[in-house]
Amino acid sequence: MTTVEETQVEVSAIERSKRQRASVTLLHGRRLRNALRLLLLYVLAGLVALVCLMPIVWMVKTSFETPEFIRSAQVQFWPIRFTFDNYRSVLTNPHAMIWRSMLNSLIVASAATLLNLVITASAGYAMSRFEFRGKLVFGMYLLVVYMIPRTLMLIGLFVMLAKLRLINKLMGLIVVYAAGGITLSIWWLKGYFDSIPIELEEQAMIDGCSRVNALRRIILPLALPAVAAVGLFQFVDCWNEYMMALTIIQSANLRLLPVQITFFMGIQRVEWGPVMAFSVIVAVPAIILFSFTQRNMVSGLMAGFSK
């Protein structure tokens, strides 16, 4: 009887050992698959980043090259001979009008962003806190309008601005830019306002605060990450926009930076060195702004989507 029990114990020990080895093998297999999946994800992300960065790297490289090396058939990913002549020609050339165009872009982008934030913050708060007839239809209308390409609305906007006598005026461009970013911004801010407890403003109104003051002193400070993210997104979009600025603005002294690049290129011959230097100067403010605020911008936008 003792021998049988010892045999059973040995068999159970062997089975436990087999199960342990099988579980260890399964665990190693899962870890290996997860590691391979993570490696594949990093490789794909690296390829996507490389494809996105190559035009930027090429633009910066070309802006520091001499015309002889730019026209040569030899492909180089690093300037053979550095020169700042391209930047010097852009910054000092009266035909470039870069400082005037930069001032116009700054005025239009800043004013359109402020106007957009005033409208979207108010509308997003109303969509979050109030119940009114047609609320769902209005929300769906905003999404449908956002999906319409801007080029399809270009002729209608031009006719409307012509009747309002806003063609060839920065104010007309400010109105168009501010209105163009309203649709999605309202949804972003509504999502963030929904996450703020309504009891906070109710308590403030019990203490004698009006709804407007409650919005200004309580809700907006709490929603500052989302408001800042929407504002930055709107500013960068206005800074880089081309088609509307080309259509609405006609005077040379009112052109924005993206449009001024086109006229700076010329018609018969293109000097790619100065053009790339001009492009780098246009891109630098937006890149600097995003690099300093990317964490708040991404977190604010994701918070608006996830609430």
Image: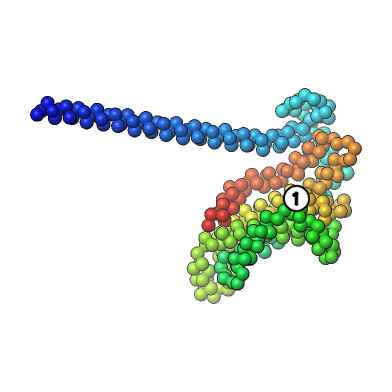
Q: Which corner quadrant of the image does residue 74 belong to?
A: top right
- The spot of residue 9 in percent (x, y) is 18, 30
305 vs 252, left or right, is left
At label 1, the amino acid type is Glu
Of all residues, the one furthest to the top in this rendering is 74
Residue under numbered circle 1 = 241
Of all residues, the one furthest to the right in this rendering is 268
96 vs 25, left or right, is right
Q: Which corner quadrant of the image does residue 283 belong to?
A: top right
- The spot of residue 290 in percent (x, y) is 65, 46
The N terminus lies in which quarter of the figure? top left
Residue at 62 percent across and 62 percent down: it is 140
Let me know if residue 107 appears in the view: no
Q: In front: 68, or 29?
A: 29
Residue at 82 percent across and 35 percent down: it is 272
Residue 25 position (above or below residue 181): above
Let me know if residue 236 appears in the view: yes
Q: How is the image coloured?
A: rainbow
288 vs 30, left or right, is right
Q: In front: 242, or 3?
A: 3
- The spot of residue 293 in percent (x, y) is 62, 48
268 vs 207, left or right, is right
Residue at 54 percent across and 75 percent down: it is 208
Give the number of callouts. 1
Residue at 30 percent across and 31 percent down: it is 20
Tag 1, which secondary structure?
A: loop
- The spot of residue 102 in percent (x, y) is 79, 49
Categorize mark 1 by other alpha carbons within 10 Å: few (<14), some (14-19), many (20+).
some
Q: In front: 23, or 130?
A: 23
